[in-house]
Image: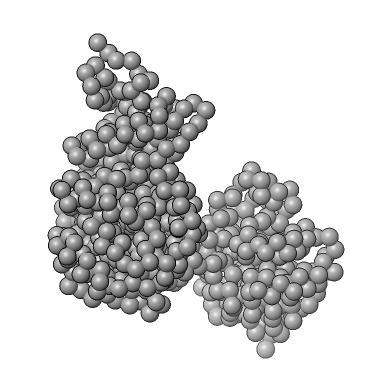
Amino acid sequence: MPKVCILTPEDVEALEAMCEGASGYFYRMLDYLEERIREGVRRGAFTQEEAEADLDVALWYSYACNNIDEYEYYYRAAQWMPASEPAAGAAGCGMWYYRYSCALLYCGRLDEALEYARRGVETEPDYVWGWLQLGKLLSHFGDRAGALAAVERGLALEPGDYEFTTLAREIRAGCSLEEMEFHWIDPEQDQLLQAGKGQGAEDKRRAIAGILCDRENLAAIKGVLQPAEWEADAPYCTFVLPYGDGRVTGRYSGSEASLSKLPVSWVAALAGRLPELERRGLTFLSMEAGVGTGGMALSWFAIQPDRRLSLCFQAGEESQLVRFEADFTLSGEDQPALEGPGEGGTFLAFVLLEEPEWDAEQFKRDLRDEWGIPCMTEAADDGDGGSTLLFDVSGMTAAVTLYPFPVPRGEAEQCAKHNYLWPEAAQAAGRHRAQLLVSVLGRGADPREAGLLQVKLTCAACRQAGVLGVYANGTVYQPEFYQEAAQAAEEGALPLLNLVWFGLYRTEEGMGAYTEGMRSFGKDEIEVLGAGAQPGDLRGFLIDIALYVLEENITLQDGDTIGFSEGQYLPITRSAGVWADGMTLKVPYPDDVPLQT
């Protein structure tokens, strides 16, 4: 039976003409292929199955998808390739195995990627790039000797090649698979990339983020979201969350591995602010876009890898999208950003434990006896050594989750260095082997009430055995300090020192100070820059401002003034943060501003 011709010589010539120039040609290449296949199937020249089984089509299809260098297209290549494997094996085509292995790699399917890399060099030992792929994967799986041997085979075929010599150096240095993939083929462009000067670095990082899953951080993200349903990599990560009296569907536009790289604190803020984002989205549609919103409600939301959001509102057959930036401000040319940081009400703390164990029943007793808060639910095990206690308190959602591993990426140890009140903070944090994530989602409650509940939960958690510190507000608190500061709550006052950290640092211009924790209340963080003040005086000044803002529940704006004595008018500016991320309020130190009469 004669072979069905899918690609004509003219098709191949057209595709080859797209191989040079900008990366945009690869999109055109893929469009050309898909249109060619659709037209051929429509005319009856061949079937869809015959097109998918064709080796030449598979090689061009995977070439286009892999060079676009985005997760969605790697996924498409990985879905397309298996049907043509018999043809690749019969032809002894190492290139097919290499390209399929690359697609599998960027879909996070590393065991399969290694298997097909091995098959590739066995099928066609003289195909040089198969050895490059095999070397990276063998190194990742701990076979350093095998990885270096693969590099040697590659250099024998391509003496002095830049990619192989770079890979050999990185294998010997113990670089990770993600580090090995953070390269361009062209030496000059790659050197710019490594120096932080090349274009496309962020796109490259986003693609690489889909290779390795941070299982510990993913578990923490799931602990915050508490999903009722979860489906990974089909092609995206989709989940269903409890929301109001029902549920809402969320989608991350990437793989589970990529999702696992999001900061837990950001995910918690999103979960807590969904009702606020829904209200703001409906307000925008009604007031700014002139859309009738009667009967509309949040149907689903989508998260992009850069943390931008899309919220879909639906009423019957009608639907509208509203987009938000990563900092939860409205985005887009027709969507003016809102002033201010949002409503707040989401609080997080990580109680650092010496051993990966806790006594949930003791926690419940301590919470009841110390703070009069009942918890009638039972802790649910996750099957991996962790467990979660999830319950409601006055309409707010409280959760305490044991994670039998340290806070990922050494984050707690780094932030512990900011605690100038506890010199041993970093040393203590470095000993933790597990964590209790304590979280409160205000669900529309007064953020001060949510913060007060957070402190009470955390204090009860601090009574567990082997507590080393409390990681919250960008630092690590000494457990004794945290519990002592919480006594303000027993007297009916806001336990400010538990909920806001007042950082200090010194520059050539003078002392600097900043808050971390005000955003949980829906307020801007506050900074004082280049103050001519003693550290203790500056800290006290910043505490006074924060306490005034929170106790009086006021929102300071750019151009306002504040003062604590007669004739004192300190001008407030709002601009990009110096120490803190996002927009912050800048207040000058009083001694640096003359009194007005």
Camera sees residue 169: yes
Q: Position of residue 37 (x, y in %)?
A: 56, 70
Which quadrant is the C terminus positioned in?
top left
User: Residue 570, relative to residue 114: is it above or below?
Assistant: above
Q: Residue furthest top?
A: 597
Q: Residue 104 versus residue 378: which sits nearer the camera? A: 378
Colouring convention used in this rendered image of the protein: one colour
Q: Residue at x 31, y 61 (%)?
A: 462
Q: Does 107 sit left or right of 217 as displayed?
A: right
Residue at 22% of width from left, 40% of height from top?
A: 550
Q: Is residue 282 shown left or right of residue 473?
A: left
Q: Is residue 156 left or right of residue 591?
A: right
Residue 354 or residue 11, whichever sits in front = 354
> Vertical placement of 3 versus 352: above or below?
below
- What is the number of callouts on the image? 0
Q: Quadrant of the N terminus?
A: bottom right
Residue 239 position, x and y percent, is 34, 68
User: Which residue is drawn at the image coordinates 82% and 66% (left, top)?
Assistant: 155
Tell me, yes or no, if residue 584 can be seen here. Answer: no
Nearer to the camera, 478 or 455:
478
Q: Is residue 440 above or below residue 127?
A: above
Taking the spot 51% from the left edge, 73% from the top edge, the residue there is 42
Seen from the viewer's position, the closer of residues 81 and 490 is 490
Q: Work out which residue is located at the far bottom of the displayed protein and give it.
A: 1
Residue 97 image-quadrant placement: bottom right
